Image: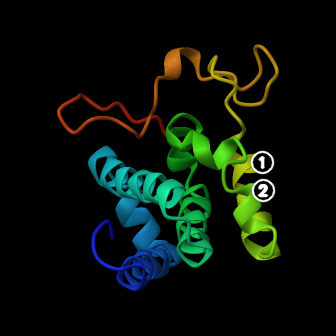
Amino acid sequence: METGSELSKTVATFIVQKILLEETGLNYVCATAERFYAVSTVLANMVHLLQVHPSVRLLKHVVRCYLRLADHPRAREALKTCLPNSLKDGTFGPHLTNDPTVQKWLSQLLAIVGRDDGNGDTNGENGNNSNEGNTNPLLAQPSRTVVYRDAK
């Protein structure tokens, strides 16, 4: 997903999107911290590349992947701390003026995972929905011990 032409990146991201859209695929990716970390890291790298070389077509699939990950309870919690800031701070706003679908998906994503103000407060309200020390039930480096909490 990170190498090749814009078209090959778009196709690769579309394939990941289609896998995530299947319940089995979403559950597979979110079954372990390592799998989630691998997918979320590649998506974050794609967002970073899109800052340098914008492509609404590619961004659409990346945002849709994040939105689908947010459907999983543990992934949603992890995304509160690992969603790239450039998706939260309006970096891509000027590129999305002609694509209301991507605007809507990005707004939905931010509403689901919240906006982090840099102090661990994802909703801009001190004390509500904070990430207490940014402990993350799903996101961890593969060499770390991962403790899962059951989704409620």
Which class describes the residues within 10 Å of circle 1: few (<14), some (14-19), or many (20+)? few
Which class describes the residues within 10 Å of circle 2: few (<14), some (14-19), or many (20+)? some
Image position of 105 (left or right of 13): right
Which residue in the structure is indicated by mark 1? Answer: 111
Image position of 56 (left or right of 6): right
Residue 137: x %, y % from top left: 44, 34
Q: Residue at x 33, y 35 (%)?
A: 140
- Colouring chosen for the image of the structure: rainbow
Q: Is residue 83 visible?
A: yes
Which residue in the structure is indicated by mark 2? Answer: 107
Depth check, front residue: 93 or 18: 93
Depth check, front residue: 38 or 44: 44
User: Helix, strand or loop at disc 1?
Assistant: helix
Residue 108: x %, y % from top left: 76, 58
Q: Residue at x 53, y 76 (%)?
A: 21
Q: Residue at x 36, y 50 (%)?
A: 41
Image position of 12 (left or right of 119): left
Q: Is residue 152 visible?
A: no
User: Helix, strand or loop at disc 2?
Assistant: helix
Instruction: Tell me which corner region of the image, top left, top right, bottom left or bottom right, holds residue 92.
Output: bottom right
Residue 28 is marked as: none
* Amino acid carrying mark 1 in the image: Ala
